[in-house]
Amino acid sequence: QSVLTQPPSVSGAPGQRVTISCTGSSSNIGAGYDVHWYQQLPGTAPKLLIYGNSNRPSGVPDRFSGSKSGTSASLAITGLQAEDEADYYCQSYGVFGGGTKLTVL
Amino acid sequence: QVQLVESGGGLVKPGGSLRLSCAASGFTFSDYYMSWIRQAPGKGLEWVSYISSSGSTIYYADSVKGRFTISRDNAKNSLYLQMNSLRAEDTAVYYCARIRGELGLDYWGQGTLVTVSS
């Protein structure tokens, strides 16, 4: 049982918008700690996708966006593409979510 | 460009020891906190340990406390993880990652596989 709760899976058709939720508590997200998001393509190391709740590292398309409110955070992906099929993890301070597998239909 | 290259993984018997290394390049290693993250086969990510830029501040997950020791050599641009009393549940790919800001992990190595089995 991860400290941060994510849905095990989400799916969407190419071009659609999907969101992935990350629910924490007053000990992590709710305490004001930043939320970061990572994308892990099959067989590769995780890659930083969003840092500090809503900031994109250089090179990450603006189709990816992050937000945070209270004890939860969300990752939104618009204009879904086949290459977005991956596992996505949220992280706040020293804890990770359990991961969400995104399937592009 | 930033590069992190892990080494030292392998097959070890329960109760055995391994020392992982992470060679860093492309940035001023001594300016950054560094961490070890692991991922058991088919599972999610787990924070193992982190160390401050000077080595004065160290964190361990409860699951490894007392068995694992993180260290760094800023002169050699290297991060280490000494793993003792290994258990089957320590089997995982171990990643070295650079920390930015509030424990965000902005660069990751390719990982090294540790398998604990008799």
Image: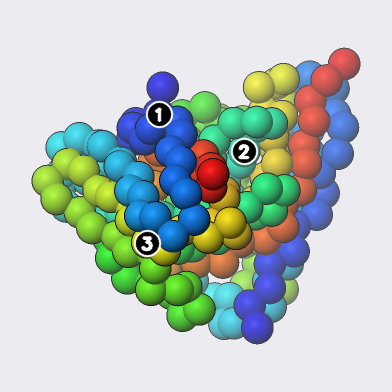
Q: Residues within 10 Å of mark 1 (few under 14, many from 20)?
A: some
**In this rendering, is residue B12 above or below A45?**
above
Look at the numbered disc 1 and give the secondary structure of its residue.
loop
User: Residue at point 59% right, 31% down?
Assistant: B43
Q: Earlier in the sequence, mark 1 or mark 3?
A: 1
Q: Give the letter of the chain under mark 2.
A: B
The front one of A34 and B29 is A34
Q: How many dots with numbers?
A: 3
User: Residue at point 21% right, 43% down?
Assistant: A72
Q: Residues within 10 Å of mark 3 (few under 14, many from 20)?
A: some
The alpha-carbon separation of the residues under discs 2 and 3 comes to 28 Å
What kind of residue is marked 3?
Thr
**In this rendering, is residue B99 above or below B42?**
below
- Foreground mark, 2 or 3? 3
Residue on which the image places disc 3: A78
The alpha-carbon separation of the residues under discs 1 and 2 comes to 13 Å
Residue on which the image places disc 2: B39
Labelled pair 1, 2 in contact (Cβ < 8 Å): no
**In this rendering, is residue A64 above or below B90?**
below
What kind of residue is marked 2?
Gln
Look at the numbered disc 2 and give the secondary structure of its residue.
strand
Residue on which the image places disc 1: A2
